[in-house]
């Protein structure tokens, strides 16, 4: 069965943040697999163990599965007093299975017909058997010829580097063979994705007075649209570099993509990060593309051009106060390649006493020197 937060992908922040669910299956074990979403804290137990397990989850970085051998499982989402993120939601699947299949793989041996709403997580084992079965297989069928199957099975992948494969056809057969009889684990999500060549513009662009531009498709209630896209041309003038910052990243990583590209070079952004863009990337393209399947809340990014000039050379530290000296004006802590700046820092101690230190800063690419005279 599908198990979701209320009105997924709507955020639970400022709404019902305290809820509990109890799953019971007579004479069966239970397997819970989270497939999408993010939250800071929840409790999960088998309704027998005295101490519940505290968990967190972020689907772009985590794989979270849990199993109960008691036929009972309680999930409790607590009212979080110190909320650290604006989007909290989750999407999961609960699967009852016979104890006799504990050494098998989830959903193994089944033929499952997919539609646009069906999402099936598969894995190498349930997590309760020391020596899982060597061979598992799955068959997935699609009735709609306008759909394609998507999954994350490939070689040399990891939680921090998920991958997606789109496979055309009406039937998909997957086989897992542990030929070395060693611990080889995987987790994948299988779903049907509508085929569409029609893309919809899904971002807003907000220019600021300092030249900064905010690019976003954040929607904490509805999430971003299926097949949405947006693009931003990166322009860097002579004598400038730029800062590109992804402040929020609620995107199905590895599937719905944020990229910066120029010619044949493509860099995929896979989390919230901050980086500097040099003049040789002038004319590159920042782009977002979503497929027609799982959605999250979206992303928010900022492009800020910075002029490669030094902050004022005379810097006075006020009496009994602290302050910050930055390489560039207006409090910008980044600096440009081959930038060479001189600063005189005056420390005001009293009306009669003045102590001066002359600092010289020199930057070349990732190498920096600070000379104090």
Image (tube, helix red, strand yellow):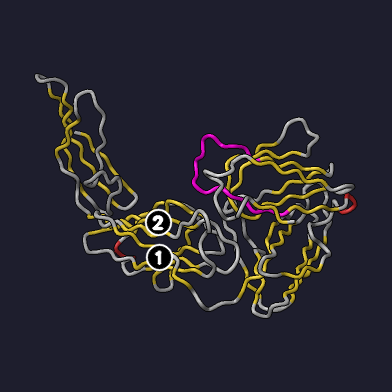
Apparent side of residue 345 relative to residue 283 in the rendered image (left or right): left
Q: Is residue 148 above or below residue 31?
A: below
Indicate the secondary structure of the residue bearing disc 2. strand
Residue situated in front as seen by the camera: 262 or 48: 48
Find the residue positioned furthest to the left: 352
Secondary structure state at the residue bearing disc 1: strand
Q: Mark 1 Cα within 10 Å, few/some/many (few <14, many 20+)?
A: many
Where in the figure is residue 248, as x and y percent of width and height?
Answer: 46, 52
Q: Is residue 57 at all visible to an observer of this figure?
A: yes
Is residue 297 shown above or below 225?
above
Which stretch is magenta? 77-93
Tell me if I can see residue 179 in this picture.
Answer: no
Whether residue 314 is in magenta: the answer is no
Q: Quadrant of residue 254?
A: bottom right
Between residue 39 and residue 361, name the one nearer to us.
39
Locate residue 178, reporting x and y percent.
Answer: 78, 59
Quarter of the picture holding the C terminus: top left
Q: Quadrant of residue 321?
A: top left
Quadrant in which the N terminus appears: bottom right
80, above or below 310, in the image: above
What residue sits right under mark 2 in the picture?
301
> Residue drawn 18% across and 31% down?
357
Position of residue 34 in the picture relative to residue 139 (left or right): left
Find out whether the residues at labels 1 and 2 contact each other: C-beta distance under 8 Å. yes
Which one is earlier in the sequence, the residue at label 1 or at label 2?
1
What predominant SS class does the magenta segment belong to?
loop
> Badge 2: how crowded within 10 Å, few (<14), some, or many (20+)?
some
What residue is disc 1 on? 286
Frontmost of labels 1 and 2 is 2
Residue at left offset 75%, top offset 52%: 94
Locate residue 216, reporting x and y percent: 41, 59
For image coordinates 73% across by 31% down, the residue present is 51
């Amino acid at each position: 069965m599908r198990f979701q937060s209320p009105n997924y992908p709507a955020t639970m922040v400022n709404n019902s943040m305290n809820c509990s669910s109890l799953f019971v299956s007579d004479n069966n074990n239970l397997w819970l697999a989270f497939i999408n979403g993010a939250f800071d804290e929840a409790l999960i137990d088998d309704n027998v163990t005295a101490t519940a397990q505290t968990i967190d989850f972020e689907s772009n970085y985590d794989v979270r599965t849990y199993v109960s051998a008691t036929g009972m499982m309680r999930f409790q989402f607590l009212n979080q007093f110190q909320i650290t993120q604006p989007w909290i939601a989750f999407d999961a699947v609960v699967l009852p299975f016979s104890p006799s299949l504990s050494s098998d793989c989830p959903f193994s041996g089944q033929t499952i017909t997919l539609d646009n709403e069906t999402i099936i997580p598969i894995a190498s084992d349930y997590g309760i058997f020391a020596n899982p079965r060597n061979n598992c297989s799955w068959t997935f069928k699609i009735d709609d010829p306008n759909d394609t199957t998507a999954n994350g099975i490939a070689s040399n992948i990891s939680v921090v580097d998920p991958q997606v494969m789109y496979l055309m056809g009406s039937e998909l057969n997957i086989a897992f063979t542990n030929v070395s009889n060693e611990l080889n684990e995987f987790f994948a999500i299988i779903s049907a994705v509508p085929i569409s060549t029609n893309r919809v513009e899904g971002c807003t662009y907000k220019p600021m007075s300092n030249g900064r531009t905010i690019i976003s498709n954040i929607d904490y209630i509805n999430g971003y649209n299926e097949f949405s896209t947006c693009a931003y041309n990166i322009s860097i003038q002579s004598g400038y570099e730029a800062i590109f910052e992804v402040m929020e990243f609620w995107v199905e990583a590895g599937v719905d993509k944020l990229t910066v590209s120029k010619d044949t070079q493509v860099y995929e952004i896979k989390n919230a990060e901050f980086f500097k863009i040099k003049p040789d990337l002038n004319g590159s393209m920042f782009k977002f593309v979503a497929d027609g399947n799982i959605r999250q809340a979206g992303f928010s990014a900022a492009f800020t051009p910075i002029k490669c000039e030094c902050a004022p050379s005379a810097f006075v530290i006020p009496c009994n106060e602290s302050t910050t000296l930055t390489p560039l004006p207006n409090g910008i802590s980044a600096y440009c390649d081959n930038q060479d700046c001189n600063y005189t820092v005056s420390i005001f101690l009293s009306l009669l006493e003045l102590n001066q230190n002359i600092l010289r800063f020199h930057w070349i690419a990732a190498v920096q020197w600070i000379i104090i005279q």
